Image: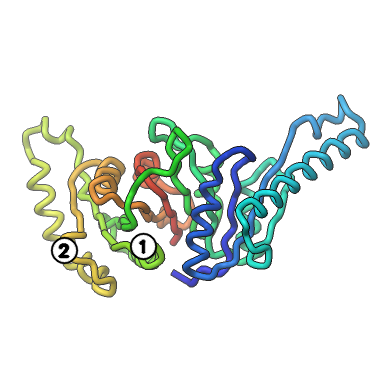
Amino acid sequence: MKSLKTILVVLDKPKHPQSALDKALQIAGKTGAHLHLTSFCWHAMCEQNDVFDVHQRRSMKKEILRAREEWLWQLIRDRKLNAADITVEVVWARDIADWVASEAVKRKLSLVIKSVHRSNRLLHTSLDWQLLRSVPVPVLLAGVTSSGKRPALGKDVLATVDLRHNDRKHRTLNLRVLDAAARFAEISGGRMHCVAVVEYSKALDELDLITARRVRKDVIGKTQDLLAAMLEPYDVAKTRIHRPAGKVGQMVAETARKTRAGLVVVGSSASGNRLLGGAAEKILERVPGDLLVVHP
């Protein structure tokens, strides 16, 4: 993973705990990355030209932006942040994901960070999915429980690799996942784990033709050399290599909980269209901590 130079932080609305900012400050403190704090505003009434005239709409929009900017600078003062180390921007935008995707290219961003609020372990807003699918740089979702607190997890990082395919695009994506996981483990001061799930459905048990144990043994035998070659540069002990059999999303989530990993790194689709794919989306729905998505 390239060095982290510029990080765009999507701030929560006022009165929220700003976990994305907390995570960004932690990373910047270790890497020296520049933070660009962005707060978004939009209100439908300012677009209702059949109700308000142009001067009224302009005045309402100006006041909303002024109040948000005042809040943002107060946040900086309350946090005692050095204004020389950050830049701030209040943006009027309805399509936040599209704006962030454009900025990622224009500013040559290294990373985008946003908090994700969970309800029954599901992603709470569609914006999270839109960012993951459209932004061409790594996106880190800082986990928050339903109570608004960060989950109490460790410093270790779990890299999720896909060994079901061995074409060039999948190999490249797996290496980017491992590289990012190693970088963030260094930043957090934790260890790197790797999980490569042997995909298996319990429905096959009913056919009485094959068992999960047999499938796992066969797949591990065929892929262990490939995995060993990928992990060779990263000094991952055998005890930190996990090969569970089952549904990918469920097994990755269980491994994350078992290892108490504070961050799970997953790759988006290797097809190049930046869609996550079913397995990756299941992972994102279930893991308890922070989530980092990298692209091919």
- Report the number of numbered marks: 2
Quadrant location of the C terminus in the rendered image? bottom left
| Scheme of colours in the image | rainbow
Mark sitting earlier along the chain (2/1): 1
Residue occupied by mark 2 = 238
Residue drawn where x is 64% and y is 45% of the image: 96
Task: Indicate which disc residue 181 carries.
Answer: 1
Residue drawn where x is 65% and y is 56% of the image: 102
Q: Residue furthest top?
A: 51
**Secondary-structure class at tag 2:** helix
Is residue 160 at least partly visible in the picture? yes
Side of 85 relative to 209 (left or right):
right
- Which quadrant of the figure has residue 136? bottom right
Height in image: 13 above or below 106?
Answer: above
Is residue 133 at least partly visible in the picture? no
Quadrant location of the N terminus in the rendered image? bottom left
Side of 139 relative to 108 (left or right):
left
- Which quadrant of the figure has residue 64? top right
Name the kind of residue labelled 2 in the image: Lys
Q: Position of residue 248 (x, y in %)?
A: 28, 45
Side of 67 relative to 110 (left or right):
right
Residue drawn where x is 72% and y is 49% of the image: 91
Circle 2 Cα neighbour tier, 10 Å, few/some/many (<14 / 14–19 / ≥20): few
Q: Residue furthest bottom?
A: 233
Name the kind of residue labelled 1 in the image: Ala
Q: Are marks 2 and 1 in contact (CB under 8 Å)?
A: no
Circle 1 Cα neighbour tier, 10 Å, few/some/many (<14 / 14–19 / ≥20): many
Residues 136 and 93: in front is 93
**Secondary-structure class at tag 1:** helix
Q: Position of residue 86 (x, y in %)?
A: 64, 63
Q: Position of residue 201 (x, y in %)?
A: 20, 38
